[in-house]
Amino acid sequence: MDRRTTIKWMFAAAAAMPSLKTFGYTPAKLALDVAPNLPGYGTDPDLVKEWKPGGPWPLTLSAPARALVAALCDLIIPADDVSPAASSVGVVDFIDEWISAPYPEQRADRQIVLPGLVWIDAEADKRFGKQFAELNDAQRSAIADDICQPAHAAPQFQTAANFFATFRDLTAGGFYTTPVGMKDIGYTGNVPLERFDGPPLEALKKAGLA
Amino acid sequence: MAFISAADADKNSYDVIVVGSGAAGGQTAYTLTMDGAKVLMLEAGRNYQPATETPMLQANGEAPLRGAGTPEKPFGFWDATVDGGWQVPGEPYSSASDDPARQFVWWRARMLGGRTNHWGRISLRNGQYDFKPHSRDGLGFDWPMDYADLAPYYDKVEMLIGVYGANDGLENTPNSSPGVLLPPPKPRVSDLLTRQRAAKLNIPVIPGHRAVLTQRLDHVRLPKLLHPGNAKAQKILAADMQKRAACFFATPCGRGCSIRANYQSTTVHLPPALDTGNLDIVTDAMVRAVTKRPDGRAEGVIFIDRKTGAEHRVKARVVVLAASALESVRIMLNSGVANSSGKVGKYIMDTVGAGIGGQIPLLEDMPLHNEDGVDGFHLYTPWWLYKEQLAGKLGFARGYHIEFGGGRSMPSMGTAAGMEWLNGGTYGRKFKEEARRYFGSFMYFSGRGEMIPNDDCYAELHPTQKDKFGIPTLNFHWKWSKHEIGQAAHMQTTFAEIIDAMGGRMPSPPQPGEKAIKQGGIIIHEVGGAMMGNDPAKSVTNSFGQSWDMKNLFITDGATLCSNADKNPTLTIMALAWRASEHMLGLMKKKEL
Ligand SMILES: Cc1cc2nc3c(=O)[nH]c(=O)nc-3n(C[C@H](O)[C@H](O)[C@H](O)COP(=O)(O)OP(=O)(O)OC[C@H]3O[C@@H](n4cnc5c(N)ncnc54)[C@H](O)[C@@H]3O)c2cc1C
Ligand code: SF4
């Protein structure tokens, strides 16, 4: 795969990325602030209207970047017997919304996520001569196994492991806040009740309280 | 009478001007108007209607950024705060020191009802020790009143707003009168486990007190008790109480409550006060200063219409500042009034805060059940080491209470995040299994402790800085003493012991006090700055919040507090406001005002 093409699509929205010539992972040198002066939703947003990613501020990931994000989300949260994969319930839109947001925390995460995406594709190319999204499950896992544990990653994988941890948190937050995610994880609240009965007996037994 | 324009306010005449519409302003206007006084309320923020503006059942997934907090909505997207936070655009403040440990951060909200729309609803009474702290340990200041002076007003406020809890009769943790409290909600599993294990450490765990209706208010009994001999007030209140639903045990209270099941000034104080026909409210009215009559009494106030920038002057027999403690301080300093003691701005206090979270294996893989309850705490721990402390065994003065929580609350960005300390870091099916296993097994313990007023904590006017209205801003000085830092350290080790006793584990060890203590202002319980007292040379007001210098100027917010017990200040602010307003009514009837 042509590395320069990868960079181009990855940072399609990043006008301030002129001199990125290699995959050298140097986030400090990457000027990733693609949305420096965008307004947010303000200090008095309408709380009863419908909100969607891309509403309060534009999304910034290109189509190929979104495909990579989808592949990574689904590596972290694949379909299983209980619930579908993360990408099937809007988590890609959410991650795009998050890293495109004009607030400090999200902008900091953007500085981690965008170079991380570059790294992932470069690593896929280096190991298997393909983009990450084109790899099979075993190939994806081979890379993920090296970066999924930040405290135990080899030195050359440390930065990528930190990226992976951030990306995993975003994926989890995006997924478990959806209706299927809430059901999957066992959240049964947010329904009006006439009475609050407290925990059932089995729950008390489980905790050694009955 | 109702919501009126700034221009109309100029034309009318009022008995009392109330500045601010939060807990203090709401209670003051309620008590005054129910007894027939004509009141003009001036509120800097916009009008706000909880019935139509509250996102009740929206899940986090429906909010931008899954509802996560941002500088524009610090407590999350769905939180009720309007135009607020630790920074308000165009309304700056400053700290004298560059050292973060010596800076104070100031949370404000600019909306009708102020912070009562999104507060935690934790409503604890000060106890008898809390009114005489100096007599007890030689530190800080005694109040010019006793618990017995305020107890009837605590009862009244609790009956009016609706507070759940129980009378456990623990030391310096007063009971309410019989028939005042609503039943507490049933404990969650995490509450019961905490209680069982804390008992082994001799730490009590009892029902919490919060301003949430676990059942509907008794609209037959309560109005008679609250307004004896006042048939009109009873009728208005009885009708309004019937419009408040009981909690339906879902939806976070910080968003506000469209069914009026918890206390907000906008859903509890203002509707009946408006129904009396005695209350006019001008919103977007930023008060700059109190004006003076030639005889030295207050004439009225100057305010700026936020929408037009125009300046207005209104007059009344009495002026009440209830703009939140530090805003009231600012108005007094900018007016150059009520400060012959030189104490305006002095002895500002927050609450000491520190906390630790842990993971409790016994709470893993719980059978599915709904743990929303009343959203806030069901049980808590009041301060329990009075005797040890008095005997000098702790090395710091004054206590803290513990707020704790756990269980399966509505998933947010924190759910299943940062699990590396438990599992190293996984992905795929294993990750999903672990997310299920750990969900609801985390607990958090927060200490909320008493800060002793000290000479290093005060607010003054900034020499040059002005806000967007051209009003001089506040500059803060701040320093925790060894007592607060010692308390924070004690919180850390105690919470670690509790988590340990629950068989739990923590991501990191307890921290030393200096590191653990939250910055001044972070707990958002700021009070003081216009302390009440018996001596006009050493205090700003008497025990009724009445200025010594300007007899028709009252302060009914937290500015007058002489200490900031670990009880969270708002219930006390409301009880004081009720008492002060009754006093005002009495003086007005006697034509002394
Ligand atoms: C997230 C959060 C949780 C909290 N939880 C608890 C809790 O559980 N228990 C507890 O006891 N306390 C709690 N508090 C604190 C509690 O909110 C305050 O103690 C309480 O609201 C104080 O009431 P107040 O009327 O003095 O001020 P506010 O409620 O702040 O109201 C003051 C009003 O005055 C207006 N105003 C200010 N300046 C001017 C001016 N110049 N002219 C006109 N109007 C002006 C403001 O816009 C505001 O509407 C919490 C606070 C926050 C933010
Ligand atoms: S938990 Fe109850 S009181 Fe709180 S907002 Fe929901 S319904 Fe209202």
Image (tube, coloured by chain):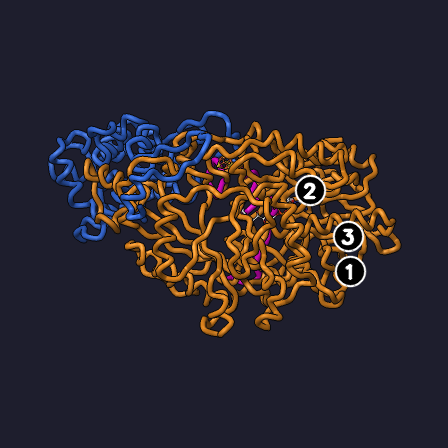
Chain colours: A blue, B orange
Q: Do labels 3 and 2 share a chain?
A: yes
Compared with B149, B257 (above or below) is: above
Where's residue A72, x and y in %? 23, 35
Q: Give the foreground label among 2 and 1.
A: 2
Query: Which stretch appears magenta?
Result: B73-100
Q: Are marks 2 and 1 on the same chain?
A: yes
Identify which amino acid the numbered label 1 is placed on: Trp
Between the residue at mark 3 and the residue at mark 2, the CA separation in whole angstroms equals: 26 Å
Residue with the mark numbered 2: B226
- Disc 2: host chain: B
Question: Element type at marker 2?
Answer: helix
Relative to A70, is B477 on the left or the right? right
- In percent of the image, x 12 and y 36: which residue is there? A139
Near mark 1 (Cα within 10 A), the count class, few <14, some 14-19 or many ≥20, is many
- Disc 3: host chain: B
The image quadrant that residue A202 belongs to is top left
Residue with the mark numbered 3: B553
